[in-house]
Amino acid sequence: MTFFDLRRAKLRPGEEHREELEIELPAFEFGGQRYLPVPERIPALLAVTRAVTGTVFTLDFTTRLHGPCYRCLADAVLDVPIHAREYQASSPDDEELRTPYLVEGRLDVSGWARDAVALALPDKILCRPDCAGLCPECGKNLNDEPHTHEETETDPRWAALEALRDDV
C-alpha cells in the first residue's frame, strides 16, 4: 500500500506540492474475472494544493490491465489513463466535503488509485473492438474460426409462431 503523509508537505494556502510516487495496485475482480495491473507498481504524479477552505488532491497515471476478454475469454489488454481529483475541507460540515482516502493526515494513494481505475473501466473489457465471441452452439472462438451451423430442428412448441412468420 502506498501512503502520502500530508505533514511532509507543510503547505500554506495557495501553495502546491507535486511529487512522483510509485503506486502499488492490487489485482481487480471485474465481472467475476481477475484483471492484473502490469507492472504492479506504476509511476504516478500526486499534486496537493492547499486552498483557504481545504486541500485539493490530484492524481495522474496510466495503468495497463491484463485479463480475459468479456466475449471470447482470450487475453485482453486495456490501457487505462487516470486523472482523479479529491477534496478535503478544513472543517467539513458535509460528507461531500470529505475524502475517504485521508485518515489522520495520511492519504491512502493506493486505495484512491484502485477506486479511480475501477470507475474508469468500460462496461465490457474486450480483446479487440470487433470481437465476435464464442459460438453459442459449439463454444469455438468465432474470431479464429468464423462459421455457422446447419439449421437444427426447431422446438415444436414454436410451430404456431413459425406459421405466423410464414404468413407475413
Image: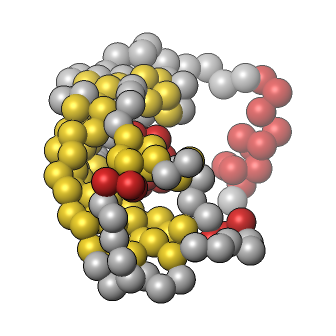
Image vertical order of residue 87 relative to residue 79, above or below? below
Asked if residue 149 lies left or right of residue 15, the reply is right
**Quadrant where the C terminus is found in the figure:** bottom right
**Quadrant where the N terminus is found in the figure:** top left
**Which color scheme does this rendered protein use?**
secondary structure
User: Residue 110 is drawn in which quadrant?
Assistant: top left
Image vertical order of residue 128 relative to residue 71, above or below? below
> Residue 108 in the image: x percent, y percent?
45, 44
> Residue 42 in the image: x percent, y percent?
20, 39
Q: Nearer the viewer, residue 64 or 136?
A: 64
> Residue 33 in the image: x percent, y percent?
47, 24
Q: How many marks?
A: 0
Q: Nearer the viewer, residue 97 or 105?
A: 105
Asked if residue 68 lies left or right of residue 158, the reply is left
Is residue 147 at all visible to an observer of this figure? no
Asked if residue 40 lies left or right of residue 121, the reply is left
Is residue 20 at all visible to an observer of this figure? yes
Identity of the residue drawn at 76% across and 50% down: 164
Identity of the residue drawn at 32% across and 26% down: 36
Image vertical order of residue 168 relative to residue 68, above or below? below
User: Residue 74 is drawn in which quadrant?
Assistant: top left
Asked if residue 27 lies left or right of residue 62, the reply is right
> Residue 53 in the image: x percent, y percent?
53, 83
Q: Nearer the viewer, residue 134 or 94?
A: 94
Identity of the residue drawn at 18% across and 29% down: 39
Identity of the residue drawn at 36% across and 77% down: 12
